[in-house]
């Protein structure tokens, strides 16, 4: 079994996240992609939407594909979780022959700050999705896939634009915004 792991805050999930999952399924030789929402990103001090809300939104967006699993491992830890912990957990659970870790190009600049990054690179192959507005000379070190949708969750938290929200959760996001 070959496995891809796509972790992140997904705060909120947007169409680029959805496109990344679909492109990974079509471009990588994988049997399953595990989408792992963080409880709290180790590089951040807070979240916008509660972890369980983000988990349920992800489930709603990806519920139709048996090759996509939404994993609550990090949320259940009730603390920031390092990727190495999640990879080891999923490695023990699935016993895959190969693991890919999917990241956006914006994550490369801080990759050297990730906990146990050298061990992580030994356990998994990083796949970087290229993003508009990022120039990175380190891309040659990674397998890359093109997506280039110019949106970020940060932008959506500042101003919700429903055109960037997956169809399945537009009503949910509207309701959540009214309670904020």
Image (cartoon, rainbow, N blue to C red):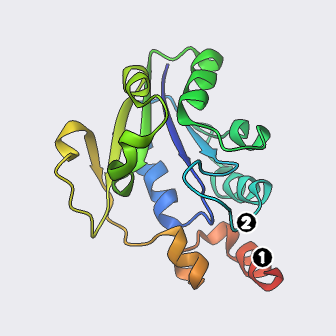
Q: Secondary structure at mark 2?
A: loop
Q: Which mark is residue 49?
A: 2
Q: Nearer the viewer, residue 69 or 152?
A: 152
Image quarter (top left, top right, bottom left or bottom right) of the C terminus:
bottom right
Q: Earlier in the sequence, mark 1 or mark 2?
A: 2
Q: Is residue 171 above or below residue 169?
A: below
Res 28 visible: no
Rendering coords of residue 98 (x, y %): 42, 20
Task: Tell me the residue that label 1 is attached to.
Answer: 176
What residue lies at 33% left-to-right and 54% top-to-bottom?
105
Tag 2: Cα neighbours inside 10 Å, few (<14), some, or many (≥20)? Answer: some
Residue sticking out furthest to the right: 179
Rendering coords of residue 149 (x, y %): 37, 68
Asked where in the image residue 148 lies, by quadrant, the reply is bottom left
118 horizontally vs 176: left or right: left
Res 107 visible: yes
Q: Are marks 1 and 2 in contact (CB under 8 Å)?
A: yes
Rendering coords of residue 175 (x, y %): 79, 79
What residue lies at 71% left-to-right and 60% top-to-bottom?
57
37 horizontally vs 109: left or right: right
Asked where in the image residue 12 lies, by quadrant, the reply is bottom right
Number of residue marks: 2
Q: Secondary structure at mark 1?
A: helix
Q: Which is in the foreground here, disc 1 or disc 2?
A: 2
Q: Nearer the viewer, residue 106 or 57?
A: 106
Q: Which mark is residue 104?
A: none
Q: Is residue 127 above or below residue 12?
A: above
Rendering coords of residue 171 (x, y %): 74, 77
Measure how far apart labels 1 and 2 are at the Cα level. 8 Å
Tag 1: Cα neighbours inside 10 Å, few (<14), some, or many (≥20)? Answer: few
56 horizontally vs 166: left or right: right
What residue lies at 43% left-to-right and 21% top-to-bottom?
123
């Amino acid at each position: 079994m070959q496995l891809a792991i796509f972790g992140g805050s997904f705060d909120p999930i947007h169409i680029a996240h959805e496109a990344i999952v679909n492109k990974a399924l079509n471009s990588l030789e994988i049997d399953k992609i595990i989408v792992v929402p963080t409880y709290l990103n180790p590089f951040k001090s807070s979240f916008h939407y509660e972890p369980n809300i983000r988990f349920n939104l992800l489930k709603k967006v990806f519920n139709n594909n048996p090759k996509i699993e939404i994993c609550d491992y990090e949320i259940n830890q009730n603390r920031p979780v390092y990727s190495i912990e999640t990879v080891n957990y999923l490695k023990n659970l699935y016993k895959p022959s190969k693991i890919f870790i999917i990241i956006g190009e914006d994550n490369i600049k801080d990759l050297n700050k990730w906990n146990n990054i050298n061990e992580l690179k030994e356990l998994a192959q990083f796949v970087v999705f290229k993003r508009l507005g990022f120039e990175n000379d380190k891309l040659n070190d990674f397998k890359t896939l093109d997506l280039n949708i110019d949106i970020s969750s940060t932008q959506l938290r500042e101003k919700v634009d429903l055109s960037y929200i997956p169809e399945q959760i537009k009503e949910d996001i509207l309701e959540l915004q009214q309670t904020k």
